[in-house]
Image (cartoon, rainbow, N blue to C red):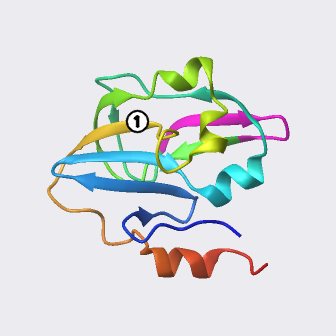
Amino acid sequence: MSKVPGDLRYNATHQWVRLEGDIATVGITDFAQEQLGDVVYVELPEVGDQVTAAEEAGGVESVKSASDIYSPVSGEVVDINGALEDSPEIINESPYQDGWLFKLRLDGTTLPADLLTAESYSELLPAK
């Protein structure tokens, strides 16, 4: 069964966001990495890029498929997880910790209202 940490917010396309001050860390959910299978490549935005909530900000490829990454929030990219370049499988091993994708400085001070709580996101997932 997929893990859904309660301290994060989620979008319907299976990305998560952790807010620390005005910095938002973004990654893909445990469910997403399970569906993808073994991740073999990650395309990330560049530091300094502006990304917009609900728009494509990168991509993830696995042995089974490829999937776009849609940022759950808007802001300027201030950091990327460079470890994923050589070891994309970190996403499979630790999607909520070591497998984070990028960090943004938020455009505003609050998260978008359409982000889901852990409980709401869990309701979107298929029952096992």
From the viewer's perspective, is 7 left or right of 16?
left
From the viewer's perspective, is 110 left or right of 118?
left
What's the amino acid at mark 1? Answer: Phe
Quarter in which the N terminus is drawn: bottom right
- Say which of 122 and 65 sits in front: 122
Q: Position of residue 59 (x, y in %)?
A: 60, 35
53, above or below 92, in the image: below
Residue at the image position 65 percent from the left and 36 percent from the top: 60
- Say which of 34 and 64 sits in front: 34
119, above or below 113, in the image: below
Location of residue 86 (image quadrant): top right
From the viewer's perspective, is 22 left or right of 93?
left
Quarter in which the C terminus is drawn: bottom right
The furthest residue to the top = 86
Residue at the image position 66 percent from the left and 60 percent from the top: 31
The furthest residue to the right = 64
Q: Position of residue 33 (x, y in %)?
A: 68, 49
Indicate yes or no whether the magenta region holds residue 59: yes
Q: Residues within 10 Å of mark 1 (few under 14, many from 20)?
A: many
Residue at the image position 50 percent from the left and 80 percent from the top: 120
Indicate yes or no whether the magenta region holds residue 62: yes
Report the number of numbered marks: 1
Residue on which disc 1 sits: 102
Which residues make up the magenta segment?
56-66
Residue at the image position 57 percent from the left and 56 percent from the top: 29
43, above or below 101, in the image: above
Location of residue 88 (image quadrant): top right
Q: Position of residue 94 (x, y in %)?
A: 57, 45
Q: Disc 1 on helix, strand or loop?
A: strand
